[in-house]
Image (cartoon, rainbow, N blue to C red):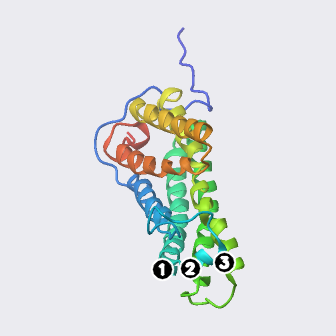
Amino acid sequence: MNETTPLSPSVPAASGTEGRAGFTAWPLLISLCGVLGVIALFLEGRPDANGSDFDYPVTAEDILGLDHVPYRLSGAVGYILALLLIAAAVIWRHRVERRFPGSSGATAVSYGVIATAALVTLTYGWRGAVGNYLPTGAEGDTYDAAGLYSYYIMTDFSPYIAFIPLLASSYGLAWMAFRERLVSRGLGTLAGLFSSALLVAVFVTGVPGLPAMIIVGLIVAGIWLAVGRSPITAAQP
């Protein structure tokens, strides 16, 4: 007598299946997070931005000439981004993790996004503070040049470093593609190679902010999931 072996609770129900082609709107929130991340990241002022003949090292007095507007805008966009990252994690939880409770890759995606939201809140709060305390800002008389220089140093790399947990989300997508068959292998390959390339670039160059370019991957991943073929976006029977 033949018996049907039940699926283990640790194995996603749709493992090994292909998604149906079509359009799914919710992954575009991931792409929106990537777009806002790019905007927030590059909204800043640097004392060496007006020419290649700038004298190094940067001093506290150089910071006094920065425009406060880009920093204020960056801080505001960063806060919106943090909220949208949390919203994306909530949607991912309801649309993916609960539907495929055995997927460790899906959990890695969630953890990376939540960790990024927390770091973005902190680092872009510092960006907004620089905009507030620069001489042309609303509270421009609060700190002297040395105090402003401290805030500037805090925002030199921290807004870039804030996106590093998304590398875990990217590797989670790769795991979902090749181990769990929940997203397309093309997306999983791109996610794994891009994340690894960014890590290698850090080790080779010593520049800690390079992994921030993973936010470009958010744009691609969201669009890919929205229009591509993946079980996590396939309609339930």
What residue is shown at x 51% (from left), y 36% (from top)? 197
- Which is closer to the viewer, label 3 or label 2? 3
* Type of amino acid under label 1: Val
Relative horizontal placement of residue 158, taking residue 225 as reference (left or right)? right
Q: Mark 1 or mark 3: which comes first in sequence?
A: 1
Towards the viewer: 62 or 87: 62
Q: Is the residue under label 3 in contact with that under label 1 (CB below 8 Å)?
A: no
The residue under label 1 is 69
The residue under label 3 is 148
Image mark for residue 131: 2
Q: Residue furthest left?
A: 22
Q: Mark 3 or mark 2: which comes first in sequence?
A: 2
Task: Look at the image and tell me in which quarter the C terminus lies.
Answer: top left
Q: Position of residue 43 (x, y in %)?
A: 47, 68
| Local SS, label 1 | helix
Q: Is the residue under label 1 in contact with that under label 2 (CB below 8 Å)?
A: yes
10 Å crowding of disc 2: few (<14), some (14-19), many (20+):
many
Q: Mark 2 or mark 1: which comes first in sequence?
A: 1
* Type of amino acid under label 3: Leu
Relative horizontal placement of residue 182, taking residue 58 as reference (left or right)? left
Decide: is 192 above or below 4: below
Decide: is 99 above or below 142: above
